Image: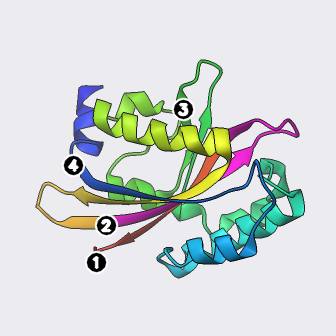
Amino acid sequence: MGLIKDTISERTFDFQTIFGPSFKEKPLDEEEWQSFIKNIRGEKCMELANLWYSKACLAEGVPQRSDFSFEELVKFGTNIFIAKQQDEGRWMTTFCGSEVVEKTGFDSTGKYLDEIATDGTLEYWKNNFKKLVTKGNVYIEYFTLEFANRNYTHCTRINFPIRSSEIDLIDTVLAFDHFSIKS
């Protein structure tokens, strides 16, 4: 396990988070959403944000996984990361797109986050996920990946809350990673 943690988390730094509106405890606010999405980088990232928001409007809150068709999500697949909270409160990656695998050098599909993250990185992710599941907040993370050859890739990840069923329990994060050489 140590090698995986060393290759992923030890070279990930400069974490920053911008929390967006909550979609669980109050009516949707178009103005608040528009202000939030100004922070999104990448055309595909913006497309997925608009798709998620349209589903949230139809659901009048956090959408269910079943609200999204395969055809709608497939065009984002290479940059999608999906994690689901398990019964014991641990987060497991259920899907890791090929672009994410290529940029991080690791396919985390089927792995628990505590298997791939250092304590500091895990704490950062879990704190953000906690707000996502309890409040239904969307949020953007910015971080930098450093590679052995000292090249840097910057990532803008937008995280969307998803419900697995009609129950009001949010247990899934749908994320889109936009990679760039520009900070």
Q: CA distance from mark 1 to mark 2?
A: 7 Å
Question: Residue 140: horizontal and vertical position, in percent?
Answer: 49, 61
Category of crowding for the residue at label 4, using alpha-carbon neighbours closer than 10 angstroms: few (below 14), some (14–19), many (at least 20): some
- Pick whichever of labels 2 and 4 is earlier in the sequence: 4
Question: Farthest residue in the top direction?
Answer: 88
**SS label for mark 2:** strand
Q: What amino acid type is highlighted by mark number 4?
A: Arg
Taking the spot 39% from the left edge, 28% from the top edge, the residue there is 115
N-terminal of the pair, mark 1 or mark 4, is 4
Which numbered marker is on residue 182?
A: 1
Q: What residue sits 76% from the left and 48% below the top?
A: 25
Which residue is tagged 4? 11
| Label 1–label 2 contact, CB within 8 A | yes
The answer to whether mark 2 and mark 4 are in CB contact below 8 A is: no
Q: Amino acid at mark 3?
A: Trp
**In the rendered structure, are the residues bearing label 3 and label 4 in contact, judged by CB atoms less than 8 Å apart?**
no
Q: Earlier in the sequence, mark 3 or mark 1?
A: 3
* Label 4: which secondary element: loop
Mark closer to the chain start, 3 or 4? 4
> In terms of secondary structure, where does tag 3 sit?
strand
